[in-house]
Amino acid sequence: MQSDILIPQIYTTLLPRLVSYIAYRINDTESARDLAQDVFVRLLESHAVVLSREAGEAMVFRIARNVVIDWLRHHYVKTEADAYIALYAQTSSNDTESGIVARDVARLEKTCLMTFPSQRRKIYAMRRFGGMSAKEIASRLGLSRRTVENHLLTGTRQMRVSLRSCI
């Protein structure tokens, strides 16, 4: 099959350019190398038929664009959470007070979690309290990774809005 021949050639010729493309957008060379590998894994997992070198290159950069968007979305959510935690740690002067506030926030989170639809609640809890990745959750629940990511995104937004309104 022609596709089996073209993909290794595309990989060999495009990898340096793809790493540069991703690194420019996320400003992290190490993560860019990992993401470039993910791009080719997604290409192979998609079982797409690559009929020409140009079509393969276009497909690779389309996948790369989506991978970068997913990475940035996750990065900014994590950065926002880290900033909130750092800000709270700076303003909190008493360990006892911190413990009480942390328990209150955890209780608010669990209360808000109970308002989620059952599937979203299960997925959010597996990620938040179980530390599982979207891929692990998807395989365990028999869902697509994209469905899990959508539930996580929606659940995180909903949780953020609820916690902001209470704090």
Image (cartoon, rainbow, N blue to C red):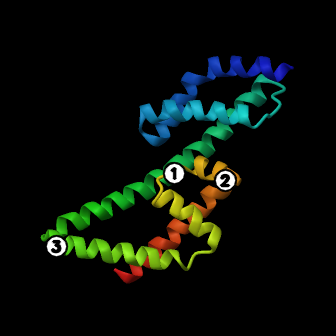
Question: From the viewer's perspective, is residue 157 above or below residue 31?
Answer: below
- Residue 155, image x and y in percent? 55, 68
Q: State how far apart marks 2 and 3 are (Cα).
A: 41 Å
Residue 132 in the figure: left or right of residue 66:
left
- Tell me where residue 43 appears, x and y as whole percent: 70, 34
Query: For the point 61% across and 63% down, which residue is it?
Result: 151
Q: Identify which amino acid the numbered label 2 is placed on.
A: Arg
Q: CA distance from mark 3 to mark 1?
A: 30 Å
The kind of residue tagged 3 is Thr
Q: Give the camera-side residue of 21 and 125.
A: 125
Residue bearing the label numbered 3: 96
x 56%, y 49%: residue? 70
Q: Residue at x 63, y 72 (%)?
A: 118
From the viewer's side, name the closer residue of 138 and 167.
138
Eye-nearest disc, 1 or 2 = 1
Calculate the distance from the C-alpha at mark 1 to the C-alpha at mark 2: 15 Å
Q: Secondary structure at mark 2?
A: helix
Q: Position of residue 100 (x, y in %)?
A: 24, 76
At which x and y percent is residue 30?
43, 31
Q: Earlier in the sequence, mark 2 or mark 3?
A: 3
| Side (left or right) of 102 relative to 51 | left
> Is disc 1 placed on a helix, strand or loop?
loop
Q: Which quadrant would the N terminus be assigned to in this image? A: top right
Kindly identify which numbered label has been placed on residue 3: none
Q: Which residue is mark 2?
A: 146
Judging by the rendered image, the residue that carries numbered circle 1 is 132
